[in-house]
Image (tube, rainbow, N blue to C red):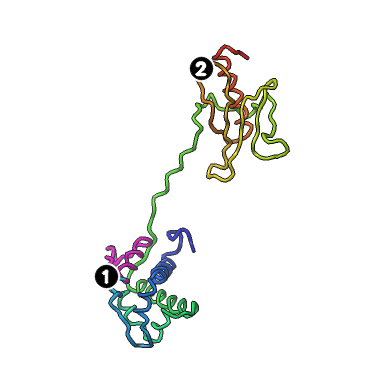
C-alpha cells in the first residue's frame, strides 16, 4: 500500500481511495449490499452513508473542482451513490463472496466506475501541500565550544565491560580506577546514541558542576566525555589531575 497518497497521480488516488473505502466496509454492510442470494434481500439503506464517507475521503487527497469552484462532498456523494445503486445484482452478490478473487474483481470494477464518473464530470487536481518544516537537529545539551572535536581521542584505557563478551559496552580506567562506562541500547528507539556514565567518586559531600551522565553520537565522543567530566569532578573536589 502506498504510504503517501499525495504523491500518486490524482486519477490513481481516486480509484485507490474508493477501493480502500469499499474494503473497510464491515461484513454485515457488504452482505446488505450483496443480498443473501442474487437479487434477493438486498438492503441499500447504507448506500448514502457509504457514498458520503467515500466523497469526504476523496476530498482529503485530491481537489475536485467544477470550473473554478470546489465541488462539495454532497454532490460527489450523489454520483457515487448512483453508481452503487446501479450495480447489477449478479455483481453485487460477489461483494460478500468467500472468494477473495471475486470480491476484489467487483471492488476494482466499482472503484474504476467511480473514478471515471468523477473525471468525466469534474477537474481533479493534486492537493498542494506546504513543505514540511525541517526537523530540529537533536543536541546533547552541550554548547558548541564544549563539544568533542573530531581529533580528540580517549586518553585512558577502555575495555569491554563483560569479560569474554564483546559488544557495545565499555568501561574506562585511569591508573586502575574505573572512571565510567559507555554503552548502546540496540533494542530502543535511541539505538544510534552512545550513553555514558561517570563512575561514582568516593568523596564526602561531592561537588560537581557538570552532569555525570548523558549521550553522544559515537563511542569515541562518549569515552572522551566521560574522561572530561570525571576529571572536572575530581578537580572541583580537590583531586586535581
For this rendering, which residue is in front, 84 or 127?
Answer: 84
- Cα separation, mark 1 vs mark 2, equals 73 Å
Q: How dense is the environment of label 2, judged by Cα within 10 Å: few (below 14), some, or many (20 and up)?
A: few
Residue 99, image x, y percentages = 49, 80
Q: Residue at x 40, y 83 (%)?
A: 93
- Identify the image quadrant of the C terminus: top right
Q: Which residue is mark 2?
A: 207
Looking at the rendering, which quadrant does residue 114 occupy?
Answer: bottom left
- Element marked by disc 2: loop
Looking at the rendering, which quadrant does residue 117 occupy?
Answer: bottom left
Mark nearer the N terminus (1 vs 2): 1
Residue 61, image x, y percentages = 38, 61
Instruction: Look at discs 1 and 2 and give the one toward the viewer.
Output: 2
Residue 150, image x, y percentages = 62, 30
For this rendering, which residue is in front, 163 or 217?
Answer: 163
Q: How dense is the environment of label 1, judged by Cα within 10 Å: few (below 14), some, or many (20 and up)?
A: few
For this rendering, which residue is in front, 14 or 195?
Answer: 195
**In the image, which disc is placed on residue 31?**
none
Q: Residue at x 42, y 49 (%)?
A: 131
Q: Residue at x 27, y 65 (%)?
A: 72
Q: Which residue is mark 1?
A: 75
Q: Which residues are magenta?
A: 50-77
- Element marked by disc 1: helix
Amino acid at each position: 500500500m502506498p504510504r503517501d497518497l499525495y504523491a500518486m497521480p490524482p486519477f490513481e488516488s481516486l480509484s485507490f481511495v474508493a477501493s480502500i473505502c469499499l474494503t473497510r466496509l464491515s461484513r454485515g454492510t457488504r452482505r446488505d449490499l450483496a443480498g443473501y442470494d442474487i437479487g434477493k434481500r438486498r438492503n441499500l439503506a447504507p448506500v448514502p452513508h457509504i457514498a458520503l464517507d467515500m466523497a469526504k475521503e476523496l476530498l482529503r487527497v485530491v481537489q475536485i473542482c467544477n470550473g473554478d469552484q470546489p465541488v462539495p462532498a454532497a454532490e460527489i456523494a450523489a454520483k457515487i451513490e448512483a453508481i452503487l445503486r446501479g450495480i447489477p445484482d449478479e455483481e453485487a452478490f460477489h461483494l460478500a463472496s468467500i472468494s477473495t478473487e471475486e470480491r476484489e474483481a467487483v471492488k476494482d470494477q466499482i472503484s474504476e466506475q467511480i473514478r471515471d464518473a468523477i473525471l468525466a464530470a469534474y477537474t481533479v487536481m493534486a492537493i498542494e501541500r506546504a513543505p514540511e518544516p525541517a526537523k530540529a537537529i537533536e543536541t546533547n545539551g552541550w554548547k558548541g565550544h564544549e563539544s568533542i572535536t573530531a581529533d580528540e581521542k580517549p586518553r585512558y584505557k577502555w575495555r569491554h565491560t563483560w569479560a569474554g563478551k564483546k559488544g557495545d559496552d565499555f568501561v574506562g580506567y585511569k591508573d586502575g580506577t574505573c572512571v565510567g562506562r559507555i554503552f548502546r541500547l540496540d533494542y530502543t528507539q535511541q539505538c544510534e546514541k552512545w550513553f555514558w556514565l561517570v563512575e561514582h567518586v568516593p568523596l564526602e559531600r561531592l561537588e560537581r558542576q557538570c552532569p555525570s551522565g548523558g549521550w553522544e553520537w559515537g563511542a569515541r565522543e562518549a569515552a572522551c566525555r566521560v574522561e572530561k567530566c570525571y576529571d572536572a569532578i575530581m578537580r572541583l573536589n580537590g583531586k586535581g589531575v
